[in-house]
Amino acid sequence: MSNPCSSVVPPDTPLEVLADVLKKAEALITGNDEVKILLKKAIQIASGLDEYLEKTTTQPSPALQELWTRTRSERWHENYEKGITLFDLPVTCITGHVEGQVLRFFARMAKAQRVLEIGMFTGYGALSLAEGLPLDGTVVACEIEPYLEKFARLSFDKSPHGKKIKVEVGGAQETINQLANERQQYDLIFIDADKTGYLEYYKTIIDRKLLAPGGTLVVDNVLFKGQVYGSEEDMNENGKALKEFNQFVASDPRTEQVLLPVRDGMLLIQHADSAEEVEKVETKDDVYSGLNGKSVMQRLRLDGKTALVTGAGQGIGRAFAHALGEAGAQVAVVDIDTLRADRVRRELISKGIKAISIQADITNKEDVDRMVDQVISEWGALHIACNNAGVNLNSASKDTTLEEWDRTMNVNLRGVFLCCQAEGRAMMKQGYGKIINTASMSSLIVPHPQKQLSYNTSKAGVVKLTQTLGTEWIDRGVRVNAISPGIVDTPLIHNEALKPLSELWLKDIPAGRFAEVTDLQGAIVFLASEASDYMTGHNLAIEGGQSLW
Ligand SMILES: C[S@@+](CC[C@H](N)C(=O)[O-])C[C@H]1O[C@@H](n2cnc3c(N)ncnc32)[C@H](O)[C@@H]1O
């Protein structure tokens, strides 16, 4: 990938301007060989740096490369003449490879969740920022040109990170006023729109607290091709605006800043008052500073953790696998059905989550041991285990066959015991682990009018097993808890035989609807995270209030 600001397009950074000036001087010199040699050397150093940075920086993702190529080959001037764009946009607008990578690093280093970009153009910066965010991160990108939203979206749709980007079409000042009215806050803000608007953007961001505490504001083009420190005569309107902007920020006691000479200059700004405010605070305990320095949201993250979920090929297990992965864990998708497990594994990989699939029958001890061994040999540890696989067979108790009873107990109770035992042994060796068993609301009430003695009994057994293990293993660092879902809208309840019961069930649910598998995702992340470390043996019912009626 080459620089858009090379020979084809006018110089766009102080270095490019310098190289250009030196080349012009070289062309004018006649005779004096010594001066020529010195000029050549100066040209080499000035014009070689950007290219060297391009080469030594990690190459962009395929989606960014494609976006770059499309941006370069678009006929921007013609678009303007035909009225497709409101303004005559120069191709040098694009952030580009090195700066894009810097933005990606900033997003990662700041552990940013929420990013605001003012001035998107074709989306190179927005996509670079999105690539640096966790799966649940968001970039709001402001852009005045409606055409650019469509242009950028084509490339965003080809990237797994594109869906993190929301484009706000319109004047950026109006958009950020609206965001401030909504009391939105961002961990990272990138200003890269009309230069004469910078000061107002800055004032709105700082005065109206759009920048979250501890957040960073990054402002692009603050050197403006060297004009801000060059002679007044060479300054155009934008150069003047940026000089004034830089002076204002430098003398603002509310912020501190550093100017990095990356390409056309990137100014990093943070709130300065935090150090003084912190001094004034009397109680600086774990509540104030966060346990081990981590905020509660950071303690809910599962980065670096490894997890397995049984019955993850569909329904609740699949939702658990996605939730754990979105929170940062690497996930082993376990199912008796290889194809289903692999399908979910591929879903996770497509979202950038590290995942493997394991075929295992949880009623078979060898399979269960192999499942745990495989996770540990793949990732070195097992931190989180969700024992979710189960069956639901129904019959009036007087007619319940021994086969139904045995099958239900075999999968729902014996299988969960086998899993807990193998997982608990591995976790106790590590001194830390989280086991979450899927029980059921039927461990608390007797759902009706369907008859399901063996199911209810097995799930009550899962709760007692959870309580017993939860108290037995807590001093070895292993927490065992259960989630008891109410009636979940999974393929299981769309079974013809169960359909007539739906209306009756709905009358019993204060929430007035069945649970969606997504209703359970917050709970699984919480129970898997260190935020719930003091909870053990608990049965967490998520049933829209059904067990209370
Ligand atoms: C330098 S380009 C942005 C480059 C972009 N950050 C990137 O990563 O490639 C500036 C963009 O700001 C947009 N813009 C200019 N004035 C604006 C305004 N008042 N509100 C919103 N967008 C504006 C322009 O249409 C242009 O696309």
Image: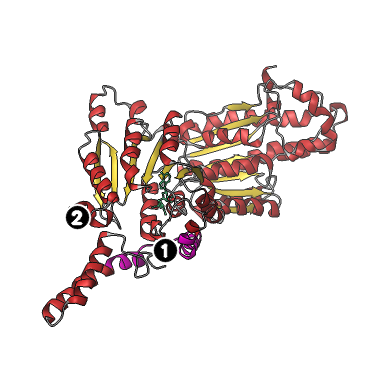
- In the rendered image, the quadrant that contains the N terminus is bottom left
Up the image or down, 432 lies above or below 504; here it is below
**Disc 2 to disc 1, C-alpha distance:** 39 Å
Magenta-drawn stretch, dominant element (helix, strand or loop): helix
Which percent across, then down, holds residue 238?
29, 50
Q: Is residue 307 left or right of residue 294?
A: right
In this view, the residue farthest toward the top is 549
Q: Is residue 336 left or right of residue 500?
A: left
Asked if labels 1 and 2 touch by Cβ distance under 8 angstroms, the answer is no
Q: Which residue is at 64% across, 38% downward?
A: 417
Work out whether residue 121 or residue 44 is closer to the camera in this orientation and state it.
121
> Mark 2 highlights which residue?
233
Regarding mark 1 in the picture, which secondary structure is present there? loop
- In the rendered image, the quadrant that contains the C terminus is top right
> Mark 1 highlights which residue?
59
Which percent across, then down, holds residue 56?
34, 66
Q: Which residues are magenta?
A: 49-78
Q: Is residue 107 left or right of residue 473?
A: left
